Amino acid sequence: MDHRITPLLTDQYQISMAYSYFISNSHNDRATFELFFRKNPFHGEYAIFAGIGQFMEFLVNFHYTENEINFLKQTLPNADPLFFEYLISLDYSMLTVKAPVEGQIVFANEPLLVISGPLGFVQLLETTALTLINFATLVTTNACRFRMAAHPEFSNLQLTRQADVKLFVKNCINSVHLLEFGLRRAQGIDGGLSASKYAMMGGFNSTSNIEAARRCGMLPSGTVAHSFIMSFSESLEIYVKNHSLGEGFTQFVSRCLFWRQFLFQSKNSIFMQYCANESELTSFAVFAYTQPKNFTVLVDTYNILDSGVHNFIIVALSLIELSYKPKGLRIDSGDLCYFSKQTRDLLDSVDILMVEAFKSITNKNYEHEIAQAKIVVSNDITEEVLYQLIKDSAKINAYGIGTHLVTCKSQPALGGVFKLVEKSGIPKMKLSAEKGKATIAGAKEVYRLFLSNGEPFDDLICSPEEQAPQLGEIIICIHPQDELLRVKILPAKVERLFIDYILDGKLLYPHKTDNSNFIKLIHKTVEEIRQEVIERMYYLRPDHKRAVNPAPYKVSLSENMSMQQRKISLESKSIPLIQ
C-alpha cells in the first residue's frame, strides 16, 4: 500500500504494558510471541495466509514521529520521560521475524507469524500484526473458496509433474473469470482496498476497484450500471436526430437499424418480432460507439430475453462490422442458471445464421464473435450459489461477486490471537478451562511433510533445537491435545513452513536500498501469488478442501515437543487439595 502505517495503530493497553515493562526493567528481556488462530474459517479445514507483505512494510518503516510521541505523552501524562526516548529508539533491527510465504496454505493451531525480540517492543506489535494479517487471511481464504467452488475438477488428483499442474491452474483461472465487485459493500476505504487486493491474491481475476487495481499493477474491470441504460428515453432513430455525435455515429446507427430489421423483419429472421425496449437499444449503441473495445452491458434492466439480449446482439453485429469484438453481457437478476442457458442458446442461434450471412452482407469474415461473447452474472452470489451454478452446468463465463466476498458475511472475523510462548529462554503456556484454548509453549519450527504424490499430509511442530525431519526416516507425529493419537510418516518431501524475513536484526525480505538508505521491499505480484495459491490448493487432498464436512488436516507435535508440553502443563497447573 502507498501510505505509512503508524505505530499508533494499536490498542492503549499495549502502550500501558510496554510502560510497565520499562519501569520494571524487563522491557529488554528476550521474548517470543506467535500469531495463530484456533479454528479454520468458514467451517473449512484450511486458510490462506496473507498480509505478511504489508506487515513487513510496517516493520521496516517502524518509527514514532514527534507528533505521535506528543500524543502518547497525553495518554500517559505521568510517565517517565525516558520511556518516550525508549520508544523513539525502537526499530526492526532488534527483531527476528519468521512466517510462511504470502499465499501459503495454513491450518488452525500452528504458528503463522513468529516474532522474537525485546519484550516491550514485541508487545507493541501485537494489535497491528493482528489487524494486518487477520483480515487479509480471511478475505484471501474466502476468495480461494470461491475459486475452488468454480472448479470441481480440483477433486481429481492426477497430475504429478509441476509443469503440468502450473499449466492446468493457469487454464482454470483463465477459463472461469471471478470478478471482485465489492467496494461499495466493503467496510470503509481501507476495508475496500484491502479486500480487493486480497480477493485477487486468493483467486479472483480482477477487481472493479480502480485504486486497488492501480496499487496492484493491474487493470480494473467493469461494465455499466442500470442507471446508464435508464438515462436514455428516446428510440435510436430519434436520438440520432437530436444528438450530434458525428457522422461516424450516424453510420453506426444505420447499421444497428439494419441488423434489427434483418434479425426481426426480413425473410431470414430467426426471431418472431422485435418487442424490445427501444431506449435500451439506444443506450447500448451509444455505449458501444463510445467504448467499442469494452462493450459489455447489463441486459436485465427491462427484460432479459425479449429485450436485453436482442438489443445486445443487434449492437454487437454492428461492432463486428467495424472489426471490434463485443466482450459480453451481464445478467444481474433472476434465475441465473436458466437465463444463462437461454441466453447462450440465443447467441448460438445467431452465430449459426451469421456463419453464412455475415460475409454475404458485409463482405467481411465472421469469426464466431457472437458465440464467443462472455456471459457475466452477478446478484448477491454466495459460495453455495456458485457451487450450484457450476453443478447445474450454467452457461456462465464470469461471475461478479461482491458482498459475500469482501465482507466475509458467513464469518466476519478470523479470530487470530497473538500469544507469548517464551521469555528469557523459558517456555510459556497459557492454560485454560477450555482444553482447546491452551497454548503450545515454547519457540517452534514447523515442517510440512509430503507424500510421494505431492500431497501435503502433516504439519509437524518441533522445537528449534531439534533436527529437521529427514527424508528416509520414519517420523512419529503426535496429536497436540491427545498424546495417544499418533501416526508414523515416511515423507517423500519435507518443507520448512517458515521463511526468515528478519534474522537477528538483518533484513532478509527481498528489498533494495537507495543512496539515502531508504528501504524498498520487493513483493511478488498479485498474479504470481494467485498462481501459487491455486497450485498449492491443487495438491491439497480433496476431502480437506471440500465445502461441506471437510476432513481435518493433521497438525502434530514431534516426540520432543509433545513431552515438553506434557512436562510444562503438569508444572504449570495447580492441583487442588481436597479435605
Image: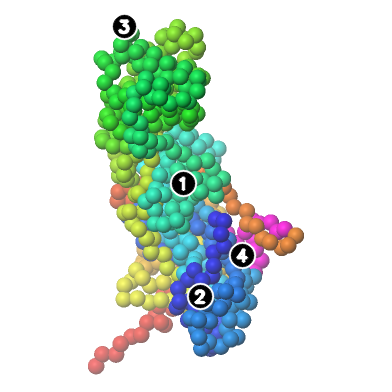
Residue bearing the label numbered 1: 209
Q: Give the CA separation, mark 4 to mark 1.
A: 28 Å
Q: Quarter holding the C terminus? A: bottom left
Residue bearing the label numbered 3: 267
Q: Position of residue 160 (x, y in %)?
A: 50, 39
The residue lying at 54 percent from left, 59 percent from top is 54
Pointer 2 with pointer 4, Cβ within 8 A = no
Residue bearing the label numbered 2: 123
Residue 60's tag is 4
Q: Position of residue 70 (x, y in %)?
A: 56, 78
Q: Give the CA separation, mark 1 to mark 3.
A: 46 Å
Q: Position of residue 62 (x, y in %)?
A: 59, 68
Q: Is 510 or 334 nearer to us in this picture?
A: 334
Report the predominant secondary structure element of the magenta stretch.
strand
Pick whichever of labels 4 and 1 is earlier in the sequence. 4
Give the residues in magenta. Answer: 499-514
Nearer the observer, disc 2 or disc 1? 1
